[in-house]
């Protein structure tokens, strides 16, 4: 087993901190604590009256961030949980509302670079991909137990891979001979399912691994179910900053922010609103905020990152 420090480049760090509009005596929530990069910058800007809560479902992240941020003492509360449970988790510590929330979605550099976690097609390891290793569902189960049609839809919808049908077919055919256990076994199956001339643009497994990871951790489902609750957790003037890493996440955030700003469902020909749905605030970032040229040069993994910001009314 490989042991390594929890290291993670905090993407769009300056832009996120700037858009939070941090008040020194405010209460802030980092729903994806990770290595603590965003949280550290928030804590630096808080007075002794300020408070910060960090939530993460990954035990390694909790341990690393707690150690990194231990100097901030009682200003920091760290909770092992999923941000989908943020409201209940905050209720347990007596916090009803916060002045700002950060979500840095996707998989961390630590998770990708730790071989035994099974997130990456670059290392030969058991198929796992769980962000929270307390859960029972693993990538290995998905690959070996889901039907061909289920695998096709996951790879097509979450991986946006044009060869999803053929990849699913090859997976089912291979597992009929032997259980698929490792990332490299899956790599070879995917490679065989994609025409050689189409394997020139990046690793052939990239999209399928992304799709399986999203399914394993219910990432899009969690995001969709959480956004309204997170907006409701904000105090007036509080901001929700969300960093996404692929179009599916960004689409969900963009739509949720737009609907929160203008929830009216009345037909456009109605002279006045009669549905009774009230705006929760305004979208600050009409277009997503993208990494700077310098950040793109320093960290290639930031190239797909987008930041969107919503302010509570």
Image (cartoon, rainbow, N blue to C red):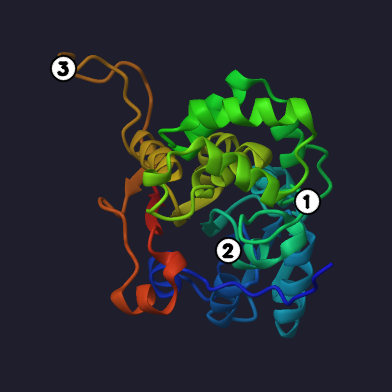
What secondary structure is marked by label 1? loop
Using the image, tell me which numbered label, if any, was put on residue 126.
1
What secondary structure is marked by label 2? strand
Using the image, tell me which numbered label, if any, was put on residue 28.
2
Residue 48 in view here? yes
Label 3, on which residue?
271
Is 57 situated left or right of 282 in this image? Answer: right
Question: Who's the residue at 45% across and 53% down the image?
Answer: 244
137 vs 218, nearest the viewer: 137
Say which label, 2 or 1, has the lower sequence index. Answer: 2
Using the image, tell me which numbered label, if any, was put on residue 172.
none
x and y, in percent, of residue 232 in the image: 53, 42
Dividing the image into 4 quarters, which one contains the N terminus? Answer: bottom right
x and y, in percent, of residue 242 in the image: 46, 54
Q: Quadrant of residue 35?
A: bottom right
x and y, in percent, of residue 151 in the image: 60, 27
The span from disc 1 to disc 3 (Cα, nearest Å) is: 60 Å
Say which label, 1 or 3, has the lower sequence index. Answer: 1
């Amino acid at each position: 087993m490989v042991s390594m420090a929890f290291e993670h480049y905090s993407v769009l760090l300056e832009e996120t901190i700037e858009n939070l509009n941090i008040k020194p005596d405010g209460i802030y929530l980092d729903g994806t604590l990770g290595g603590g990069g965003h949280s550290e910058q928030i804590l630096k800007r808080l007075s002794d009256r300020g408070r910060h809560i960090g939530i993460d479902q990954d035990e390694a992240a909790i341990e690393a961030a707690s150690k990194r941020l231990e100097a901030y003492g009682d200003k920091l509360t760290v909770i092992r949980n999923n941000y989908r449970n943020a409201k209940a988790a905050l209720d347990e510590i007596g916090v009803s509302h916060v002045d700002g929330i950060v979500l840095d979605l996707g998989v961390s550099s630590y998770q990708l670079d730790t071989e035994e976690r099974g997130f990456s097609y670059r290392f030969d390891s058991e198929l796992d991909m769980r962000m929270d290793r307390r859960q029972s569902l693993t990538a290995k189960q998905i690959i070996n137990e889901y039907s061909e049609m289920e695998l096709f839809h996951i790879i097509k919808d979450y991986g946006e891979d044009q060869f999803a049908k053929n990849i699913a077919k090859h997976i089912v055919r291979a597992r009929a001979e032997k259980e698929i256990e490792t990332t490299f076994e899956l790599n070879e199956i995917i490679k065989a399912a994609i025409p050689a001339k189409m394997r020139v643009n990046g690793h052939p497994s990239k999209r399928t691994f992304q799709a399986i990871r999203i399914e394993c951790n219910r990432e899009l489902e969690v995001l969709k179910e959480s956004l309204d609750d997170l907006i409701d957790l904000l105090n007036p003037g509080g901001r929700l900053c969300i960093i996404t890493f692929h179009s599916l996440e960004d689409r969900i955030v963009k739509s949720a922010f737009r609907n929160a700003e203008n929830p009216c469902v009345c037909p456009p020909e109605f002279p006045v609103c009669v549905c009774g749905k009230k705006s929760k605030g305004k979208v600050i970032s009409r277009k997503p905020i993208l990494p700077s040229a310098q950040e793109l040069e320093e960290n290639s993994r930031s190239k797909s990152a987008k930041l969107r910001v919503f302010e509570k009314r």
